Image: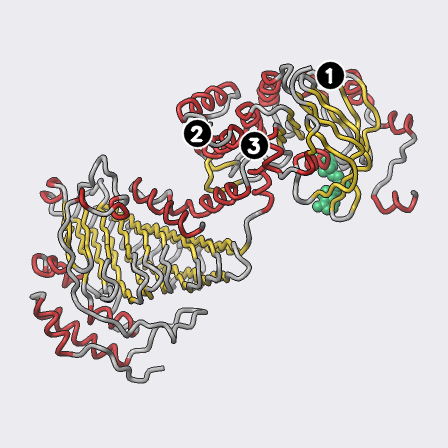
Amino acid sequence: MAGSTLEIKDLHVSIEDKEILKGVNLTIKGGEFHAIMGPNGTGKSTLASAIMGHPKYEVTQGSILLDGEDVLEMEVDERARAGLFLAMQYPSEISGVTTSDFLRSSINARRGEGNEIPLMKFIKEMDNTLDFLDIDKNMAQRYLNEGFSGGEKKRNEILQLMLMKPEIAILDEIDSGLDIDALKVVSKGINKMRNENFGCLIITHYQRLLNYVTPDYVHVMMQGKVVKSGGPELAKRLEDEGYEWLRDELGIEIVEDEETAEQNA
Amino acid sequence: MTVETKLPYDKEYIEQFSQKRQEPEWMKQLRLQAMEQAKNLPMPEPDKTKITKWNFTQFNHDFGTGEAVSLKELPAEIKDYFDQEQLPENLLIQRNQSVAFASLSEDLKAKGVIFTDIFTALKEHENLVKRYYMKDAVSVDEHRLTALHAALMNGGVFVYVPKNVEVEVPLQVMFWNENPEIAYFNHVLVVADENSSLTYVENYISHNDDEAVANIVTEVIAHNNAKISFGAVDNFAKGTTTYINRRGIAYRDATVDWALGQMNDGNTISENITNLLGDNSNSFAKTVTVGRGKQTQNITAKIVNWGKNSEGNILQHGVMKDQATNIFNGIGRIEHGASGANAQQTSRVLMLSERARGDANPILLIEEDDVMAGHAASVGRVDPLQLYYLMSRGITKAEAERLIIHGFLEPVVSQLPIESVKKQLTQVIERKVY
Ligand SMILES: Nc1ncnc2c1ncn2[C@@H]1O[C@H](COP(=O)(O)OP(=O)(O)OP(=O)(O)O)[C@@H](O)[C@H]1O
Ligand SMILES: [Mg+2]
């Protein structure tokens, strides 16, 4: 076995005292690509945010380990330096900080003091990756995500992924809002990362991304839990038939909002 | 409060001072009259800041000389303001109240560009100075501080660019004050004649924390179709109480742009007003500041649209820490008749401490119908989601905050036309924030 292992055990997460994740179990190893699908609002982004350490999400139970190390004990930046990466569904815009300066700071943060990437090497790597992802070179000099289109933001997340070379990456709806060419480019980027040292968790609603990036495992999340796992064929079935059959199979009721759910419970 | 105030200098002193400098008679008279006016004029009343206890009137006034220097022997903190590899062609260093270094390229000299200290200008270009000095931009009798300034002016620079001349290399001035016991009454006068253009950058530096007074007036005049980019980094030390008035006039099709890094450590009243007199004239006034310690600053940016289709833009960004107080007044005013005018402004304050105070007061005064105007103002803390995003890439919290703060002040830093001055401002920001 190569690469890192991320183990999520019985994870419960609340936001503003509302429990969103209700016991998630998932293990991602180097070399593996996992996909998570599931209806809106079932907690997929919550899982991603909890793994990365978003300040608003509170872990109330369970554990997250990276190669045996307790991730929940780490600050957000420590998690990143330990090898975790999250391509966010809604990346922040940061005025006055150029994308290129930000990239260099990020790379150097991971490499550590005294081991900074030489400027020329950085520029070369950045330029090559920009080319690879079909991104206009000017973007590097623009302020981070400021005024970027939805698609540009997504490409920028993949740019960061490729330059930072994490051990485990979580991609939260990296395909949303992408036109077909952009989807291909982004997929190309993700596939380029594929090797036995890199594990990836892909959150998506659509089979179309999984046509380009074939997952080894597909998980379905509903109401704060992973309710079914399988291979790529599971994603295809969801694409064809929706979630209805699964709800029936699992006896999950469709509830309009949490209040009724709680009353029913 | 218009009680007669006893001022520390009298008629006799001013006469002697003027004579010693061999000033023209009109200048001496202007000073004397101003001294009379200063006695009865009220102090300025900056919105939301009480300055009754600030000392603007008790000081030592004289003419402090500073030895001439070669650029090689300057202290590092001054040297850093220009590129050592390629020394600036157009540079003036005023050390205390006298000129320590002055150069202007032969090319610009041949084209009739004037770039010299104010006393030399009074001798060699008397008519030009007389035509503009405290006439169209700032009046002597606006309040006690302008009058005091006129009475006791003891340093400064005169810039004149003739018609159709484009100055491509920036003109750089360093006001270096080693001698804080002498009050700093600096006057800067920049005139761009028709169809000309120039970039001017000034730096005020003092490092002594002793109590001192600065009373600075800057007049910037762009004639028809002229373009002036004015950049500044102010860095007066903690003990210096500063009044700094920067005023611009833009005639038809003219541009006056400001990029002001207001990094004083002492109490400061700053007003930057631009009158867009001509049709199609425009101004972008950008200012950034960092408040620290217990300093209080009141920073006004005002653009008045008089001309048709004139366009005024104000941007003010401030970072507040410790117990500092900062009031931003952003005023856009469109006069009757200025149809097609546009007045926009943004003021933002980033609070780094619970005990700091930041205010952003946007004001729009509009006397004409067919215009555009808008404002945005905010006072807030560093956005936790921005921090989270940066930290999720491995950047430490402290470094992430640093990036966000520098980014927030970037609009002025990026605007400064000289790399070395940009770097200096960045360093001053660094020093003030950490
Ligand atoms: N700040 C908040 N306050 C209250 N509830 C919140 C907050 N943020 C998220 N939630 C709720 O948490 C639940 C899970 O949200 P999450 O973003 O994890 O869903 P998701 O599965 O990623 O959905 P989508 O597919 O739409 O992206 C939702 O019901 C959402 O409304
Ligand atoms: Mg989501």
Q: Locate the C terminus of chain A and report the quarter of the image it occupies.
A: top right
User: Residue B309, position in %: x, y?
Assistant: 37, 52
Of tags 1 and 2, the one toward the viewer is 1
Q: Is residue B311 visible?
A: no
User: Residue A221, position in %: x, y?
Assistant: 79, 30
Note whether ligand 1 is within 8 Å of mark 1.
no
Report the residue marked by disc 1.
Answer: A216
Give the mark nearer the N terminus: 1 vs 2. Answer: 2
Q: State the residue at coordinates (11%, 45%).
A: B109
Q: Splitting the image into four quadrants, where does ligand 1 fall?
A: top right
Do the residues at discs 1 and 2 belong to one chain? yes
Do the residues at discs 3 and 2 belong to one chain? yes
Q: State the residue at coordinates (55%, 42%).
A: B397
Report the residue marked by disc 3.
Answer: A153
- Chain containing the residue with disc 2: A
Question: Disc 3 to disc 2, how far (Cα)?
Answer: 14 Å
